Each structure stands twice: as structure tokens, then as C-alpha cells.
Image (spheres, rainbow, N blue to C red):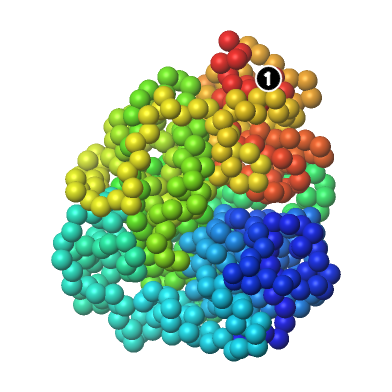
Amino acid sequence: MRLTGRVLWLTEDAELLSQQLDGQDLDAHANALPALEFGINTDLLINGAACTLGYTGDILGPYLLERFKDRVTKNAIRDAGFQVVVGGEAYGSGSSREVAVVAHEGAGIELVVAQSFQRIFQENMVYCGMPFTTDLSVVDRLRAGQAVDLDELARALPPFFRAVAEQGGLLEYGTALIDGRVTPSYRVDRAPRAMTCVEKIIARRAYGGPARERGLASVQPGDQVLCEAGFRGMHEYTTGMVMHLYAEAWGKAPVVRPDLVAAFEDHFVLLGDETVPADVKTQRLAPARKLTAEMVDACEAHGIRLHGPNRPYPAGVCHRLVVEDYASPGTVVVLTDSHSCTAGVLNTFAFGIGSTAMAFALRTGLVPVTVPSTVRIELTGDHRGIVSPKDVILHLIGDPYFREERWRRSPTDTCVAEFAGPALDGWDVDQLSVLTNMTVEGGLMTGIVAPCAAVHRFLAERRGIDPGPSFVHPDADATYARVLKIDLDDVPLTVATPGDSRNRAPLADHAHVAVQNVVIASCTGGSLADLRSAADVMRGRALGPGVRLTVTPSSHDVAVRAQQEGLLTLFRDLGAEVTAPGCGVCIGNGPGIPRPGETTASTTNRNFDRRMGAPGPVFLVSPAVAAASAVTGHLTDPRALG
């Protein structure tokens, strides 16, 4: 590759960004960098509205980085002739949406350079064939007129990634695997070693080749292996792309174990609500219905079960439904959504993947895994009915150890959080799932809850099974990247300030912030436990003047039980907009989208700029803090209400 176009430096300084868009190249070098934007996220790379339009480069290219710093307009990247894009740390944070990579290709970007990449985005680049590097000196070489061997960049990757690149992509690798033309790129004869929960699950489920039983004696961080995929799931944003890729590679070949696959109509089901702004519906509703129709057709063609309103299986947010009905201890669960890690609450290895990886998993029954390092988080103390899991996880992922990814040793490293300790039994599975759900917001691959009484009780009562024999316990002498001991007495009520979930701050520092829009919803904030917590604060009180409240249960089961307990009636009587189950406003597709001038307090898991469908600051809070804030009209500690 030679530099025939331009280099776009994604700077913190909006003026420097504007200069580049206006045609002025920055005089920047690997040893003289401008301040690069931290956490360029997938909502910035390709926004939720554009994602409804399709999944090909010609459709998505014009929208790459649209509205970044309020300076990038539609077609700006492509029209300015940029060939290379350079970002800061944690490039590709957020969603598993593979369309973020496709948008780069469609905008004419041939190389992505960043100080570090987030796992799913990096995997998507490998599987799509998009060249990338964390070596910023490559940009200096290109600008000096040198040719850069892109194959050389691929050869610097770990063995499995190299094997995929050699075959021309993951689906091509899958065909070679099915045909017996490739063998595992990793050693299958290994000595035993002490392992963490996730390492044990990977080792037990690892593919050893066509003539071997599943399982390896051990794995260790940095290994890249193929694992037996248990439950696999998709939703409306992704199913069309997954099955398009699948058909291109394998035609009408049958899906492996379709009984362990489901599709979920959850991201668009609230888009047509009368309270959704007209401009949002005009932009998103028609193409969203087209993507939904593609999902329905694919399910019928391949015998895949379908969840959603008036569908054969119950409605709800996919992650909540997976916890309710599908995830099991010791299994591997993957969905085309970054918050798949929610199911880690059930002692499951659960993580998000892109569309190409899902197509591969549907056809082969396997999923590629880079074995993560593990941080063990031991929780002690009493939450006293005050400190919630939302406070704990916001406190954790905002810690410099996670925010700065100090666990990282190489560009392709991954990491998981293993939650343990006596404090876990102070919460139920609904509440504990908040811990695992939001690990991805801290740059982690996933979270997993070590066996505990709360998980045992849930599986026994919900599924009627004794999970004891299937629980995966870590070895006493397992090796961890770090062991963190957290006493709940030391965790303050915590918020994430606007822009990133890692922007932690004590609630007390922001009690002066006025809020006009309050949202209690999503896979991390709309469970029965969440609704109960909010109702306990609001019972006998009223909404503050000028405050809007939107409540969205996370599943059909949650809605039914909340109605039976009188919770939904309580919220309606207060004047709240209570919706059917769905993702909704979390991704800007439902009631609760911020109005001009509003500040939002939300129980959702992500507060990227404009993610909720409109500009305006969004603070992430616990359900109890959201409820108290709805009463007072400013961010409020529930204890202040008496």
C-alpha cells in the first residue's frame, strides 16, 4: 500500500478536525502526536439511524463518523479523500456492529491505525479483511513515500488471525475447515494447569480437530482456539447481514444445531410509538421494518426460533431472555451484540461477536476465542439497601486500571472480570447481571459470576434444575492478572458523566445537575428488581415539575410480573410513559428520546453522544437514583428524600 490519499487524525481538538476536513493536512508524527480522541465508539463511527439503512459499504460509507465533534457531515470522509484514519486509545468501543468496519471500507479507508483497539471491533477487522495496526510509525513511513506491506501487518498478528488472513477471511477459513483443508492453528496436546472459570470453560469446549473429542487439557491467556458454540443469537440490526454473508459463503446449507439458535425482534419494536419524535420515525421506521422482514424470512428458511411481539416466542430484550431461558453454567453463549456478556451472571462464558463470526458459528458450530486474562473481583461488605450493582460496576470500570487497560500486554490481549465474594449473595440474579452486562463498557471481553447461592437459587426456581454439577469453579491456585478486593462500604453512589460509561464520578459531586428526562429501561436497567427499586423510591411521591419519565420492562415476563405487583400501575399513575418490552430509547429507537435542551438520567448502560437518538447530556445512574431524580428534578441520592 502506498499513500495516494490523505491521513485523518481523530483529534480531541475540534478545530484541528475541521482544518483536516477543509483540506489542510496535519503535520503530525508518531513521536509528535496531537491529542487523539479516547474511546472512538461505534455509535460515532456509524450511528444507530444509519445502521437501519443496510449493511453494505456503498450504503454505509457516507455516514462514517457523521456528527463527530459536530463537525463531520454526511459524505465528508469520503469526499475529502482520506485513505488512512488514526485514532487514540480504545478505538471501536461499544457495540459489536460489524457495519462500523464496513462503513470504513465504504468511505474509502484502507488502513485503520490506533493506539489500541477494542476486542470486537478488532476481531471484525480481522474477519472482514480490513488492515489495521497499533504501530503509529507506519503512518510516518506512508507519509515519507514508502510502501507498506499489508501482508506484513497480518503476519504480525497471533496464529489464528494469521490463518484467517491467509485464507482470505473467516468464512473462507470456515469452508477450508469444513473441507478438511486446515487444522487447528494451536497445539492440542497440552499439560494441565490451574485455571480460572473462563479458562476452564474454554478448555472444556475447545475444538481439537475432526478426529478428537472436544476439549484441551488447558489453555492460557493469549491462546487462540476454536470453541464449541452453545447458544447463538441475533436481532433485527444484524440478522440480515449475518444471513447474507452465510448465503454468500454456503448457500442454503443447514445451520448447525438450529435448536440452539434464536433471533430477537427487540431493537425496533418501540420505534413506531406515538411519543417517538416524527423525524426519528421518518428516518428509521421504514428501513427498520425491512431489516425485520429479512430476519423473519431467515428464521423461516433455517428453522430458527423467533422472539418478539406476536411471534412464536415471548418478547423482550435478547439479553434478558437469554438469562431467563437459554444460558447455562459452563457453556459458551454468543450473540451479535456487545451486551451478550449479561449471561455471564449464570456462570456462563458469554460474549458479543460480529456478523461474520456469527455466520461462521452458525455453519461450523464453532466460535473463535482469544483466551483472555482474568481479573478477579472479590466483593465483601453489606450494600445496606443503598449501594447497587450499578454503583459498583460504574465505580469499577471508571477505575484507571480498567479505563487505561493496564491489564493489557499486547495489542490483541483480552480480559474478563470474574466476580466472587460473600457480597454477591446480597443481590439476586437480576441485580448481579448488571455487573456482567457492563463489563464490556470497561473495555473487557465479558464478566462471569463464580458459583454462588443467588445463581443456584435462580436456576433451581426458574429452570427447575440443580446447577451444582455444571457449575464451573476456579482453581484455588489459578493465575490472575490482578485480584481486586472491593468492600461495598468503600463504594459511593456513582454516576457516569456524559460521553462514556467509564466517566465515573460520585453522585454527590453532581447533585446540582438538573434533569428533565428520566429513563428506567434496557437490558441493564429494566429488570423486575430494577422496577421494584424505582417503585420503592417513588411510592407516595410525584414527578418533579417538568420531568418526563419513561419506563420500559426488559421482557414479557418482567412486564407481567411487574403488572401483577402493581408496579406499572404505580408508574402510570405518576404520569410515566410505560411501554411494552424492548430496547427502545437505549439506542434511540423508542420513547424517552431526549428533547432539545434536556438532560437525561438513565439506567441504561451506554451514554455515548447522541446514542439515545438526540443530542443532550446523559448521566448513567442506578434505578433508585433515577427514581429520586424524577421526583426532585435533579440528580438525587434517594436517602435525601427521607
Q: Is residue 239 left or right of residue 485?
A: right
The x and y percentages for residue 533 are 52, 24
**Nearest the eye: 617 or 525:** 617
Image x and y of residue 566, in percent: 56, 20
To which residue does mark 1 refer?
Answer: 631
Front residue of 486/370: it is 486
The residue lying toward the viewer, choosing from 196 and 566, is: 196
- The residue positioned 75% from the left and 42% from the top of the image is 616
Could you classify mark 1 by the number of other residues whose Cα lies within 10 Å: few (under 14), some (14-19), or many (20 or more)? Answer: many
Q: Going by the image, does 137 lie left or right of 16?
A: left
Write the residue at 70% across / 25% down: 512
Residue at 46% across, 53% down? 405
Q: Quadrant of the rendered structure where residue 188 is?
A: bottom left
622 in relation to 433, above or below: above
Label 1: state its secondary structure. Answer: helix
The tally of labels here is 1
Q: Which quadrant of the rendered structure holds the N terminus?
A: bottom right
State whether residue 96 is above or below residue 8. Answer: above
Q: Position of residue 348 (x, y in %)?
A: 35, 49
Q: Say whether residue 82 is visible.
A: yes
Residue at 66% x, 42% y is 498
- Residue 107 higher or lower than 65, as above or below: below
On the question of residue 256 being in view, the answer is: no
Which quarter of the picture shows residue 82?
bottom right
Residue 476 in the image, given as x and y percentages of width and height: 19, 45
In the rendered structure, which amino acid carries the disc numbered 1?
Val
Q: Quadrant of the C terminus?
A: top right
Please, which residue is most extreme toward the left here?
A: 191
Q: Please give left or right for residue 596 compared with residue 165 in the image.
A: right
Q: Give the quadrant of residue 487.
A: top left
